[in-house]
Image (cartoon, coloured by chain):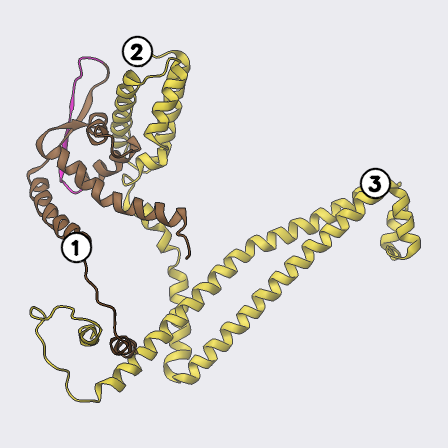
Chain colours: A yellow, B brown
């Protein structure tokens, strides 16, 4: 870090720190070694850089080098790279049980049952989204009313006299204790609760959606294989497949491809 | 006609580069040792390809994990020490093999295919064979 200005030195330290944080899972000596190597790279590049201003110079060097995440990739232990596919494992097991229970013993009937279940689940999902949507919509309307109560009391009164807004019962009694602006704030608070709940449901829905998509893929894949195996059985009936040697007739076209496949 | 998207083009270019760049790195380290920065310089000096400098480090990490390159720290007369890389003998052997494979692939890609217009008959067979 000898001939860097304090600012440049700080920028480099920050960058290397970000690199180090990406390498947390590696043994300390490997981390150090790679950081040292990158520092040497930064030094060389900095010496050769053209810019006049030293901050512009170091920034362009780091930009050329790339983001820490890119630079450290392929250095992380295998476990981290594979963790994405591992997360799906419980779903695979569930899907396997699902198919084992319904698909195999029942044949086509099982397919029907499976599809029925899938469509039922789809229905549930749609209902879920509809509920989330209506909660959000309700929250939006409440929020609007709250804003009207606070900012446009005359409009509120008009809406009440016209019958668009009817708040009575215990809620109305409760609200009547407070001045208009506080009533509005209460309504807005209530509305934001609704909106948060709705957004939360939408967010949670992603997992449901992903799970359902996975089940669909699983079932369709399985059906495809099932259909293929039936087709294969039907095809095996006509006479023996002609013998051909791969070396003399490699991939001659669609006709041969049929025999290569199995 | 539907235009391809930038995203699909970029993805393919990256895919192509990934393997070939590794070969290029091996090719450079076949004959002489380099440290990361000088390796980038050599690869880009022809000016035909722009390269994010950081991309050589993942490649070097892969190569050294598989024992295809070895590295040593060498003091520099100016600035911090440099980590030099060179191909190991097994790396050299693999490179020779990969180059042959690459030649085959390139000739496959560049071969002038004279595909005759498919007849109605042939197309029907295609459908049948796919079931």
- Residues in magenta, as a range: B66-78
Residue at horizontal 17%, vertical 13%?
B77
**Position in image of residue A134 (x %, y %):** 69, 59
Q: CA distance from mark 2 to mark 1?
A: 56 Å
Residue at horizontal 90%, vertical 57%?
A163
- Mark 1 belongs to which subunit? B
Q: Nearer the viewer, residue B113 or A254?
A: B113
Q: Quadrant of residue A227?
A: bottom left
Q: CA distance from mark 2 to mark 3?
A: 62 Å
Which residue position is annotated with label 2?
A: A2
Determine contact: label 2, label 3, CB under 8 Å.
Answer: no
Badge 2 and badge 1 both on one subunit? no
- Mark 3 belongs to which subunit? A
Residue at horizontal 7%, vertical 68%?
A247
**Position in image of residue A250 (x %, y %):** 12, 68
Please determine whether, in this image, residue B71 is positioned above or below residue A59.
below
Instruction: Determine whether the residue tagged by mark 1 lies in a helix, strand or loop.
Output: loop
Please determine whether, in this image, residue A13 is positioned above or below residue A110.
above
Task: Say which quadrant the N terminus of chain A sits in.
Answer: top left
Res A150 label:
3
Question: Any magenta on residue A228?
Answer: no
Q: CA distance from mark 1 to mark 3?
A: 75 Å
Residue at the outermost right position: A161
- Mark 2 belongs to which subunit? A
Res A71 label:
none
Question: Any magenta on residue B71?
Answer: yes
Please determine whether, in this image, residue A255 is positioned above or below residue B96.
below
Instruction: Determine whether the residue tagged by mark 2 lies in a helix, strand or loop.
Output: loop
Task: Say which quadrant the C terminus of chain A sits in.
Answer: bottom left
**Position in image of residue A242 (x %, y %):** 12, 82
Q: Nearer the viewer, residue A41 or B126?
A: B126
Instruction: Determine whether the residue tagged by mark 3 lies in a helix, strand or loop.
Output: helix
């Amino acid at each position: 870090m000898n001939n860097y200005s304090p600012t440049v030195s700080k920028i480099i330290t920050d960058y290397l720190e970000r690199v180090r944080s990406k390498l947390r899972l590696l043994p300390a000596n490997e981390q150090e070694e790679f950081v040292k190597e990158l520092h040497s790279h930064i030094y060389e590049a900095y010496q050769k850089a053209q810019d006049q201003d030293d901050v512009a110079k170091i920034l362009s060097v780091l930009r050329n080098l790339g983001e820490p995440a890119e630079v450290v990739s392929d250095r992380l232990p295998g476990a981290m790279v594979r963790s994405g596919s591992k997360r799906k494992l419980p779903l695979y097991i569930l899907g396997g049980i699902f198919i084992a229970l319904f698909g195999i013993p029942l044949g086509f009937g099982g397919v029907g049952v499976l599809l029925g279940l899938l469509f039922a689940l789809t229905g549930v999902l749609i209902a879920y989204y509809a509920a989330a949507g209506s909660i959000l919509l309700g929250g939006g309307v409440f929020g609007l009313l709250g804003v009207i109560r606070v900012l446009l009391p005359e409009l509120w009164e008009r809406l009440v006299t016209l019958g668009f807004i009817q708040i009575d019962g215990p809620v109305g009694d409760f609200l009547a204790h407070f001045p208009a602006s506080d009533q509005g704030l209460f309504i807005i608070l209530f509305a934001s609760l609704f909106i948060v709940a709705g957004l939360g449901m939408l967010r949670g829905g992603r997992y449901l959606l992903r799970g359902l998509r996975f089940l669909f893929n699983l079932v369709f894949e399985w059906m495809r294989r099932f259909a293929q195996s039936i087709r294969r059985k039907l095809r095996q009936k006509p006479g023996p497949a002609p013998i051909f040697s791969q070396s003399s007739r490699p991939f001659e076209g669609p006709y041969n491809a049929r025999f290569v496949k199995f | 006609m539907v235009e391809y998207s930038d995203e699909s083009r970029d993805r393919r270019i990256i895919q192509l580069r990934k393997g070939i760049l590794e070969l290029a790195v091996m090719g450079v380290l076949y004959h002489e040792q380099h440290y990361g920065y000088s390796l980038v310089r050599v690869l880009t000096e022809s000016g035909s390809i722009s390269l994010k400098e950081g991309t050589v480090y993942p490649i070097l990490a892969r190569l050294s994990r598989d024992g295809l390159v070895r590295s040593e720290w060498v003091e520099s007369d100016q600035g911090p020490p440099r980590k030099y890389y060179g191909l190991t003998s097994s790396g050299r052997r693999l490179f020779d093999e990969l180059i042959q494979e690459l030649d085959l692939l390139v000739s496959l890609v560049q071969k002038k295919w004279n595909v005759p217009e498919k007849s109605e008959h042939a197309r029907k067979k295609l459908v049948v064979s796919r079931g």
